[in-house]
Image (cartoon, rainbow, N blue to C red):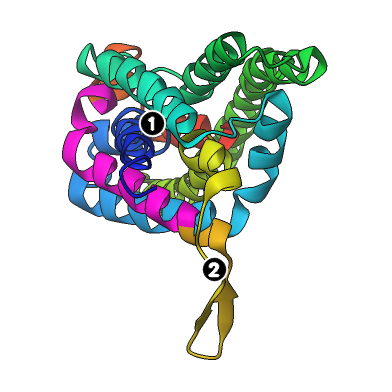
Amino acid sequence: FLFSITSGLFLGWSLGANHAANVIGTAVASKMIRFRNAAALCGVFLVLGAVFGGGGTTATLGRLGTVNAMAGAFMVTLAAALAVSWMTRLKLPVSTSQAIIGAILGWNLFAGVATDLGALARIVFSWGAAIALTATLSAILYLLFRAFLRRSRVHLLAQDAYTRVGLVLVAAFGSYSLGANNIANVMGVFVPVAPFRDLRIGGLFTLSGVQQLFLLGGIAIAVGVFTYSRKVIQTVGNDLLKLSPLAGFIVVLSE
């Protein structure tokens, strides 16, 4: 089992390297937050999101098709990890959800397992819906914030300080959401075969076996953020579109 989850840890590392740009890219590229500070903030909150908020998406992914063999779980996550790491090397932001779902569909074909087309349709629909929803939110929020700043006549120095605080807050919230939404991609296929037992922490709370698995995946994602996320941050934060700090705040808030 420990050998098999190395592919999941590799996928987690690739995810952190590729997806950190989604939540801290604009803040770092606009020089409002230093990379090390942003990476530390991102790492802490995505681990919390993975451990305490990752159950829902794991259940959805499980309905698509269950990988009930250890070797299958290893190959599914390895295939997704190789695809995501290759895209990261090319400085291209890519969805690990698309990568892991493609790998699961490949496993279903190999193993002769039926794919739940209804679950697949809902997942694919959510990708398009997310684009439409965040685009609409971003446009509305930007207009509202711009109108508010014009009416309030906030001094530029105060506006800069408020924007910096706002970027920190949305980076933390976005990182928690990143961990909660994507840990299923990293460790979800290992849930049926995980050998961990519930662990009592100092008489305060209990970590279930699944949460322990998600903790390992969350740490792998955080390591990816620290070690290899600068390239994609440059693409999202600067090369794709030059964003002001306020626009960067709106983008992450909408996301």
State the image coordinates of residue 243 (x, y, percent, origin top left): 36, 23
Quick check: 160 above or below 69? Answer: below
Q: Quadrant of residue 254?
A: top right
Residue beneath the point at 31% across and 40% down: 6
Q: Which quadrant of the structure image shows residue 118?
A: top right
Which is more foreground, mark 1 or mark 2?
2
Check the picture and name the quadrant holding the C terminus: top right
Q: Which numbered marker is on residue 197?
A: 2
Q: Is residue 231 magenta?
A: yes
Q: Which residues are magenta?
A: 213-233
Are discs 1 and 2 less than 8 Å apart at CB? no
Residue 161 at least partly seen: no
Q: Position of residue 30 (x, y in %)?
A: 27, 33
Looking at this view, is 9 or 129 the one in front? 9
Q: Secondary structure at mark 1?
A: helix
The extreme right residue here reads 118
Q: Residue at x 57, y 71 (%)?
A: 198
- Name the residue located 43 percent from the left edge and 31 percent from the top edge: 71
- Relative placement, left or right, of 12 versus 201 is left
Assess disc 2: are there few (<14), some (14-19) or many (≥20) residues with their C-alpha within 10 Å of its C-alpha. Answer: few
- Relative image position of residue 229 (x, y in whole percent): 24, 33
Say which residue label 1 marks: 19
Question: Helix or strand or loop: what does disc 2 sit on?
Answer: loop
In front of the other: 66 or 215: 66
Q: Residues within 10 Å of mark 1 (few under 14, many from 20)?
A: many
**Identity of the amino acid at label 2?**
Arg
Position in image of residue 44 (x %, y %): 37, 58
Q: Is residue 131 left or right of residue 218?
A: right
Q: Is residue 220 magenta?
A: yes
Is residue 253 or residue 84 the one in the foreground? 84
Q: Identify the mark nearer the N-term, 1 or 2.
A: 1
